[in-house]
């Protein structure tokens, strides 16, 4: 789950960069940038939860 | 490699900028005191020692390769051509500050600002790793941050990098705006603090087996609150000098920037005090201090481009955000962050970046056109870069470091206290060390 969280963080950023490079300006680019940020938010949530439930959190 | 756009503070601007840069070490001193006061008695000397050591390690790493990769506007840079646009992604200057013209004030000021800024940034994770982070590992981690993580993002935001050029290349307002380092210093430091808290794990006794946190109060509120006052001086330096060097702001605006910085911090601390008073019956000193620092961090991005009333709003929201997120990270997410660094610097900094899009009126060109939807997108892309690139990078680097050089002190060291275990002497030799000082006393 931790690995998946970080993977989604990087994937979200790749979507943001891809939107800037590939898409023309205007709404499509903005939508894809926000979608990439959304993927990152999911990844961050996953990474945070993964660390919270890991055994190390209750030493 | 082609030269980046030039920057040229001259005459009075150079003198004022230099004077402001000299204030930045106060931010480091303030953060060191805050981190020390929020830690345990038996780790106080270790925290101050670690503050000095990581500051030194950061300065040396920045000297070796950091400034080379951060570069400066007008310096050499590696540029990729993507989609027919230039993507300036890393500086290409010589290592060890070679070839620097001592008479070129704009370059030497940028280097001095960067060296001191990275010194401030590496102190931020110390707050989240308090009471359990080994001195040598903290220095190695600081060197990684000052030598790679910080320069990369600073290049993108400050030195004509691709984030700064989002405006010129893609018509997104003025490009990513972060004049005082809300992203490059605060958010990078805060995200590294999160990585360190994850990698080190919580202090022994912090969480019960059912996950319930126990309070481990800071040992000296006086240090913490004095540190807050010192940080204000440092932030005046960061925000003022950053605005002149990287925001193209006239030197005459520094007093206005100082007012905005103070208002943001004051409103944020006030909001934190009121909120903790309402929730717990009494204002909480450590959360109010975190609110103050969060307000300072939030002020850094937009301080030169907002009206004072907007600074107050930015500060109030920062104070509320920091207060709730400190509790959320500890109680819900089981993250042990004794200094509140993740919330104050990480979230505070990112909120500051977003506030540029909400409140700032930034002249995009000579005609005075101001930012709009494009500026929103530029700021969102900057925050997405922090979360999608900087966080995985800094976590990965520190995870690797932890494999070759364990970062957490041995259980015996944590029980004994970092002072005795790593330094051989305590900060307060006249005091007995309490084995159970983290137990909450009933009043």
Image (spheres, grey):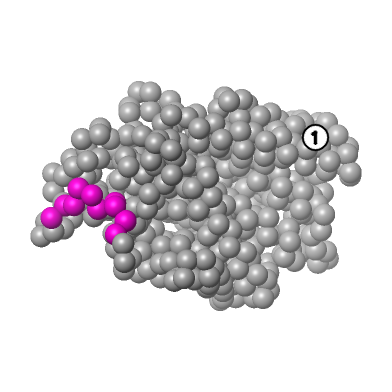
In the rendered image, residue B438 lying in the magenta stretch gets the answer: yes
| Residue stretch rendered in magenta on the structure | B432-441
Whether residue B425 sits left or right of residue B339 in the image: it is left
Where residue B297 sits, quadrant-wise, is bottom right
Instruction: State the residue in front, B147 or B383.
Output: B383
Instruction: State the residue in front, B275 or B199.
Output: B275
Q: Residue furthest left?
A: B430
Which chain is mark 1 on?
A: A
Q: Residue at x 67, y 39 (%)?
A: A41
Q: Position of residue B439 (x, y in %)?
A: 29, 52
In the rendered image, residue B74 lying in the magenta stretch gets the answer: no
Q: Residue at x 62, y 58 (%)?
A: B352
Q: Is residue B258 above or below residue B370?
A: below
Whether residue B92 sits left or right of residue B174 in the image: it is left
Q: Is residue B313 above or below residue B113?
A: below
Secondary element type, mark 1: helix
Q: Position of residue B155 (x, y in %)?
A: 58, 43
Magenta highlight: main SS: loop
């Amino acid at each position: 789950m931790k690995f998946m969280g970080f993977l989604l963080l990087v994937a979200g950023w790749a979507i943001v960069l891809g939107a800037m490079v590939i898409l023309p300006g205007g709404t499509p680019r903005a939508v894809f940038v926000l979608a990439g940020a959304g993927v990152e938010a999911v990844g961050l949530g996953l990474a945070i939860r993964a660390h919270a439930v890991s055994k190390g959190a209750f030493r | 490699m082609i030269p980046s756009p030039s920057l040229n503070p001259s005459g009075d601007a150079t003198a004022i900028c230099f004077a402001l840069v000299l204030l930045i070490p106060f931010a480091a001193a303030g953060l060191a005191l805050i981190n020390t006061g929020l830690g345990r008695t038996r780790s106080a000397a270790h925290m101050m020692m670690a503050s000095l050591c990581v500051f030194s390690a950061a300065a040396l790493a920045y000297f070796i390769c950091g400034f080379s990769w951060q570069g400066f506007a007008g310096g050499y840079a590696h540029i990729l051509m993507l989609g027919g646009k230039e993507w300036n992604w890393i500086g290409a200057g010589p290592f060890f500050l070679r070839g620097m013209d001592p008479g070129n004030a704009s370059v030497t000021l940028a280097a001095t600002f960067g060296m001191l800024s990275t010194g401030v940034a590496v102190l931020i994770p110390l707050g989240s790793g308090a009471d359990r982070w080994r001195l040598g590992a903290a220095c190695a981690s600081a060197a990684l941050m000052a030598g790679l993580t910080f320069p990369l993002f600073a290049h993108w935001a400050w030195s004509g990098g691709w984030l700064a050029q989002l405006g010129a290349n893609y018509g997104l307002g003025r490009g990513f705006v972060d004049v005082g380092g809300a992203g490059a210093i605060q958010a990078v430091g805060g995200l590294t603090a999160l990585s360190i808290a994850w990698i080190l794990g919580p202090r022994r006794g912090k969480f019960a087996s059912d996950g319930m946190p126990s309070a481990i109060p800071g040992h000296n509120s006086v240090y913490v609150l004095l540190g807050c006052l010192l940080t204000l001086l440092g932030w005046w330096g960061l925000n003022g000098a950053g605005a002149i060097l990287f925001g193209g702001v006239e030197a005459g605006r520094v007093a206005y920037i100082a007012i905005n910085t103070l208002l943001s911090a004051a409103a944020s601390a006030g909001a934190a005090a009121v909120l903790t008073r309402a929730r717990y019956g009494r204002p909480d000193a450590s959360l109010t201090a975190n609110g103050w620092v969060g307000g300072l961090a939030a002020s850094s991005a937009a301080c030169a481009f907002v009206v004072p009333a907007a600074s107050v709003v930015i500060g109030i929201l920062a104070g509320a955000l920091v207060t709730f997120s400190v509790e959320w990270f500890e109680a819900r997410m089981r993250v042990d962050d004794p200094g509140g660094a993740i919330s104050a610097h990480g979230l505070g900094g990112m909120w500051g970046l977003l506030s540029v899009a909400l409140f700032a009126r930034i002249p995009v060109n000579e005609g005075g056109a101001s930012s709009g939807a494009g500026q929103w997108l530029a700021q969102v892309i900057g925050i997405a870069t922090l979360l999608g690139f900087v966080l995985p990078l800094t976590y990965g680097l520190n995870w690797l470091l932890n494999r070759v050089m364990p970062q957490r002190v041995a259980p015996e060291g944590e029980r004994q206290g970092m002072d005795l275990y790593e330094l051989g002497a305590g900060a307060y030799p006249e005091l007995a060390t309490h084995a159970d000082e983290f137990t909450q006393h009933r009043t």
